[in-house]
Amino acid sequence: MSEQQQIASQGVFITLEGSEGVGKSTNLAFIEQWLTEQGHQPIVTREPGGTPMAEEVRELLLAPREENVSEKAELLLMFAARAQHLDSKIKPALAQGRCVVSDRFTDATYAYQGYARGVNLDWIGQLETLVQEDLRPDLTILLDVSIEVAMQRVSMRGEMDRFEREKAEFFEKVRQGYLARAAAEPERFAVIDAGQPLESVKADIAAALDAFFSSASTNTSRSAKNARLNG
Ligand code: TMP
């Protein structure tokens, strides 16, 4: 069995992160295409959401509303959706050796609820342990772009959700939160300059994926995680 086939049979968890307006949708489609071409048959999903119940929680979370939303309610709903998503979709897929790509995961909670809203990072860590146990992404692709460029792109959207209505200052905190997470775990993160022309962004993403799948150490770490997941 080739190294690539071996990795595929052990399950791989990839997450895509970034503030609003970084070009996540276009690049997610590119990641899916790259993985498919390499024979990984990816399962693409998103957070909050990814299952019928978690998608209902997403609607609750994103709907603009008059009522002030409690930071703790927002945090717990993010993790409630994640628990459902993990148990009914992500973990079973990884246990079957699939490659799962999630458009956002817990780094978003650290960036948005933690760094931007100011929720205690230790609480997030405690919920992360409760909901995920030792499951963490194997690779996180962080699309990074200046807030000026990002806000310009967001302002061109039609109807904006509850998060997109936040001010530039909020998104600057989100961006800095993501960059702090990436600096703390450089071996897991690939930080991509999403302010470049799209073809260069795609080339950098492809290089990051290639480096990840070529790395024998990643192979070992997923193997150990899967052994724990399968009990
Ligand atoms: P998106 O589909 O555009 O990424 O929208 C999801 C929104 O939810 C986005 O504004 C980020 C936000 N979010 C959080 O605040 N915390 C989280 O844990 C996740 C997954 C998303």
Image: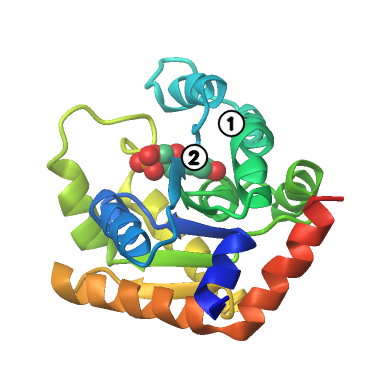
Tell which residue pokes out farthest to the front in this image.
1
- Marking on residue 214: none
Q: Earlier in the sequence, mark 1 or mark 2?
A: 2
Residue 133 x %, y %: 80, 50
Label 2 crowd (10 A; few <14 / some 14-19 / many >=20): many
Q: Which of 36 and 124 is in front in this view?
A: 36
The x and y percentages for residue 208 are 40, 77
Residue behind label 2 places its C-beta within 8 angstroms of ligand 1: yes
Q: List the residue tagged with mark 1.
A: 74
- Comparing 16 with 113, the one in front is 16
Q: Residue at 65%, 83% (x, y): give it.
A: 217
Quarter occupied by residue 72: top right
Mark 2: which amino acid? Answer: Glu
Q: Is residue 181 visible?
A: no
* Ligand 1 neighbours mark 1 (CB distance < 8 Å): yes
Q: Left of 94 or right of it: where is 156?
A: left
Q: Is residue 90 above or below residue 49?
A: below
Residue lying farthest to the top in this orientation: 66
In percent of width and height, residue 46 lies at 45, 41
Query: Label 1 is placed on what type of residue?
Result: Glu
Q: Distance between the residues labelled 1 and 2?
A: 13 Å
Residue 35 pos. (x, y %): 37, 62
- The residue pinned by badge 2 equals 47
Label 2 residue SS: loop
Q: Nearer the viewer, residue 73 or 226?
A: 226
Which quadrant would residue 165 be assigned to in this image? Answer: top left
Of helix, strand and loop, which one carries label 1? helix
